[in-house]
Image: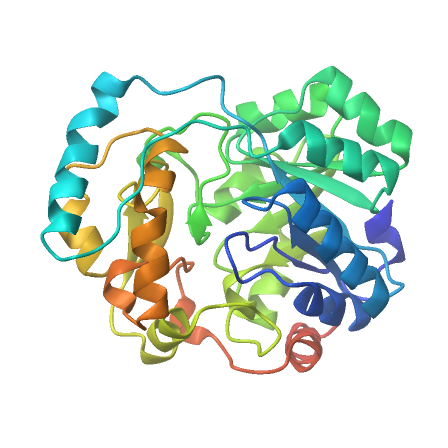
Amino acid sequence: MVLDDLTLPIVLAPLAGGPSTPALTAAVAEAGGFAFLAGGYLSADRLEQEITELRSLTSRPFGVNLFMPGAGPADPAVYGPYVEQLRGWALSRGLPIGEPRFGDDEFGAKLELLAGGPPAAVSFTFGLPAPDVVELVHGAGSEVWVTVTSPQEAHDAVEAGADVLVLQGLEAGGHRGSFADDDPSTGHPLLELLRLTAGLEVTLVAAGGIMSGADVGGALAAGARAAQLGTAFLLCPEAGTSEPHRAALRDRPAPTRFTRAFTGRWARGIVNDFMDEHDAHAVPAYPEIHYVTQPLRQAARAAGDGSLINLWAGAGYDRIRELPARELVALLAEEAGL
């Protein structure tokens, strides 16, 4: 078990969509934690390049996260009106807009890549890997980690052969890792989720709103084998976090809430103008809506405009520290008394 060999029970979350970098993953691994490289949104070729770079930076074990593809395209009748609203809104402001499309994020090609050069662990988000996927990952020598948000998902993941469950509480920033894109109001805060899954004979990693060593210690005391942190690392210089996202994290001007407006899937982020404008009209259609807003968000990031981009952040992001990753891991360990 990877976690048995760790110096510190601290795990770097995948942070797909830009913040994840080989440098950040390597820094956390070198500091004694276990770190994930995000495979989501990358082509298989780009992921291969990032893994190669990561292996040049550290000999420590690491993991790679993949997005489970959805069952199929969303109904255009469901997302069509929202897309037209977004198109009109964007064009009236001279902003680019994309077209809705469905895709599997090159899931098969990425699996083949990881089977050929296995990391220590492969984690799955947005669904339960099929038996043949679990068999392939195990056969390559990697552990299978599955993100779960409910006791039922946890039970299903254990039955499917998961080695580790990443318990994602409601406090977590970014996308909900749930198997179905259910209303977050039906979900569980982290400590409650830990309590509800305590009887499972599987390794548990706690995720969601963990920002300090005290939070890490609380998760371990509640039964987790390790604590996974994402938002806490967004201001590290090694992270690929965009400048407007960094500015919002530093300024701490607004609370966080769940939104579907940017991608068509529930995610927690810092409230901004785009969310206020579109939350009431957003619909469940992922990844279709992601591809519609992607050009708009890219343009806004390039212009330094944080009012129009997804500012993913967990609850308690106001406690973020801006430190190099190795220093942050050391501080977390000191605070937790590890």
Task: Work out which quarter of the rendered image holds the C terminus and state it.
Answer: bottom right
Task: Work out which quarter of the rendered image holds the N terminus and state it.
Answer: top right
Q: Residue at 71% of width from left, 56% of height from top?
A: 50
Of the pair 325 and 221, the residue shown nearer to us: 325
Of the pair 36 and 320, the residue shown nearer to us: 36
- Does the rendering let one see residue 192? yes
Q: Position of residue 55 (x, y in %)?
A: 84, 61
Location of residue 332 with respect to 46 vertically, above or below: below
Q: Residue at 63% of width from left, 20% of height from top?
A: 156
- Does the rendering let one see residue 224? no
Number of numbered discs visible in the structure rendering: 0
Determine the image quadrant of residue 32: bottom right
Q: Position of residue 28 (x, y in %)?
A: 72, 68
Determine the image quadrant of residue 53: bottom right
Tell whether 161 sits left or right of 79: right
Q: Position of residue 159 (x, y in %)?
A: 71, 19
Of the pair 330 and 311, the residue shown nearer to us: 311
Q: Position of residue 84 (x, y in %)?
A: 15, 34
Colouring: rainbow
Q: Residue at 29% of width from left, 67% of height from top?
A: 306
Q: Residue at 38% of width from left, 73% of height from top?
A: 249
